[in-house]
Image (cartoon, rainbow, N blue to C red):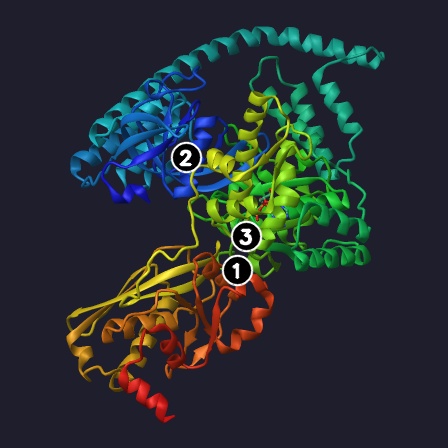
Amino acid sequence: MSEKKTRHPVLPVIAVRDMMLFPHMTMNLDVGRPKSLAALEYAMEHESNVLIVAQSNEDIDDPSGKDLYTVGTIATINQVMNLPGDVSRILVEGVRRGIAQSYHVSKGMLTATVTPYETNEENTPELEAGIRAVQDAMNALNNVSQRLASDALQNIYALSSPDEFTDILAANLLPRLTDRQKILETLNIHERLEVLCAMIERETEIAGIERRIQAKVHASMEKNQRDFYLREQLRAVQSELGQIDGSEEEELRKRMESTPLSDEAREKCLKEIERLSHMGPGTPEISTTTTYIEWILDLPWGKTTEDNLDLARAREVLNKNHYGLDKVKERIIEYLAVLQVKKDMKGPILCFVGPPGVGKTSIVRAIAEAIGRKFIQMSLGGVRDEAEIRGHRRTYLGAIPGRIINGLKQAGTMNPVFLFDEIDKMSSDIRGDPASAMLEVLDAEQNMAFRDHYMELAFDLSKVMFITTANSVDSIPAPLFDRMEIIEVPSYTEEEKLHIASLHLLPKQTEAHGLQPGAVTMNEDILRRIIEGYTREAGVRTLERTIAKVVRKSVVAMLDSGTMHRDIDLEQMHEYLGAERYTREMPEQEPRVGIVNGLAYTQVGGETLEVECSTMPGKGVLHLTGKLGDVMKESAEAALTWVRSHSDQLGLPEDFHDRLDLHVHVPEGAVPKDGPSAGVTIITALTSALTGIPVRHDVAMTGELTLRGRVLPIGGLKEKTLAAYRAGIRVLIIPKENVKDLEEIPAYVLSQFRIVAADQIEDVLKEALVRLPEGLQASLSAD
Ligand code: ADP
């Protein structure tokens, strides 16, 4: 990321109002303003961090540098979700403070030259004293008016970093944005503790005044109490006499009568309405009690939609929305067929697994449409707090139900399709383990009586059709994984993307921009150039965004020129999208020593991976750097064993191992998910580095090895082959046992390569090295 490269990186800026992001915190942010969207797009394309900074003047819609504060937070974008109406919901994680030295406008976005602010404060007694002062002030405030639940507070006190302590406390406590900004801007930790302490003391004072006012109100209320009871009695008499009583509790009572509540819920409801009728006017509890009763009544008791399990219709809906995905669609149809016969939802939960943008979410939406159920979606990405799922207890100030109950209220039926996105991205921490709450939600044995902490009553979730998605199965918590049926949604080939673009994405975007069907056209060549030149992804998300950009710019051009049709040609494509970003040219044209193109199968599809090996004088230590999972370390050690046992044939001095250190580097990238498949790559890199024989640059390989040098099969061949195709590789070395899997790969992809099926490591080296070491050549000829 750019931040790591220079001291003063230039970062895209996302300006915010009404909110702020502190370092160490994660939050959702809706981005809709054009400059912010441009910054987001830039950050996604360049895998760059962003600077999140608050506006000093919140009224300005299109802020420039002068309207922004200078201290913001450098943040990583963890997730992007497109919402209707050109708004993206992003999940951002604050990394550290960033000081904007200057703001600029470029490429339609705001950027800033940013100095990251780093602290490495020792924990001195002075600092400790500052922290205690803040804690004392905080405890005093909580005594006057409980702002934070005491266990939440204890958790904040337990944070070991003073920076984190001040930031998280400020974020949770301070109501005013200007105060929070002040804390962000106070870089020096000693000073920041002092400022925070003063702010808390001020809050305490205000709370004290509020309390005194409340006490006065209370006193006057007691005087009113007699009148109130008299009026209440009058009302009771009136209602006995059949006179209309429009009071709120009467409304609630009526609603309760007409709602098919469970016995438990009815009892709770009655009790609360009863309580309500005894409260004097102006009692603060009235509103919380009313809200609670309304929550009970708003739940979709007994309401369901009728399923339409007509398989032909389901097929039609699935096909209408999605191109290809035949296996996935067939699996969905089977699922619906079983449902028709079995008529209950007790069965494994479907989990669609695949890289981003391959259509997981949208196909679940299509399932809901096909069977005529309501659709509710909830992202679990970054959810760490059990309370997000199960709600806060009502004793907690400002408590609300969790997202499950919320979702059901929104759906308005007891049997919606409820999608949990990114079930692999949940994490657990001190605030409880959301995975165990999820387990209860998804478990057919338990979920007929799901209890939300806020609701404090059982609600039946057993009719809900829960479906989940994940990028990778590895990080799905094991107990959840056991209950799921995995349906893999694979990456798309360029050819599939072409069809998706012309049949779905372009018509969809044309409509979304208010144009007539066919108003913007692009021929196959242009679409191909867009796919190859501007996107490099397993799914079609960037492709959709890019097409949206072309359509958007076309609308402007149409209005300028007065003609309502555009057939995009090459020139317009370049005008709207700029120069192409990716080419299928080989970046390195020369064979190189010690550098080999490996192929990885990762959460985000296939990737080429340049494995690098070098030697230096030393004592036989194997250094491994970069992103090496444990399995890759084992591969590297096994590779070294093979090289040592074949030192003779490779022409290496027998004791090379005692005189040289070896360094293997696998670049950063997504974590491979197919286990050990870099064996052949690492051996080739080692052999090349030790013998000085260069490796052909247009060769890529994948395969695992036994200690004796036999090449074993690997997973994700399709994804890897597509990655090699995109990278312009000419020779593709694959394990012999994987040859049968080539069937799945389109002919036009295969026609780019010469495929080499390797059985032994020698088969690999023969192709990859520009020449074989003499000893090895001789031993092969002798065989
Ligand atoms: P995911 O949930 O896998 O990240 P989405 O469902 O959000 O992916 O898909 C991203 C976009 O691509 C959506 O607009 C979706 O309609 C479109 N899309 C994905 N796959 C297909 C397909 N096979 N046919 C048509 N559109 C598709």
Circle 3 SS class: strand
Give the position of the C terminus as an image quadrant.
Answer: bottom left
Q: Please, what secondary structure does the residue beneath circle 1 have?
A: helix
- Count of labels in the image: 3
Q: Is mark 3 within 8 Å of ligand 1?
A: no
Give the residue pinned by disc 2.
150
Q: Choose top left, top right, bottom left or bottom right for residue 143.
A: top left
In front: mark 1 or mark 3? Answer: 3
User: To which residue does mark 1 refer?
Assistant: 478
Instruction: Please tell me which of labels 2 and 1 falls first in the chain.
Output: 2
- Which of labels 3 and 2 is toward the front? 3
**Image quarter of residue 541:** top right
Q: Position of residue 456 (x, y in %)?
A: 62, 38
Pinpoint residue 687: horizontal percent, then vertical percent.
Answer: 28, 75
**Can you tell which mark lies on residue 470?**
3
Please report whichever mark, 1 or 3, sits nearer to the chain's N-terminal start. Answer: 3
Camera-side residue of 735 and 69: 735
Q: Position of residue 648 (x, y in %)?
A: 25, 86
Residue count near mark 2 (Cα–Cα under 10 Å), binned few <14, some 14–19, many ≥20 = few
Quadrant in which the N terminus appears: top left
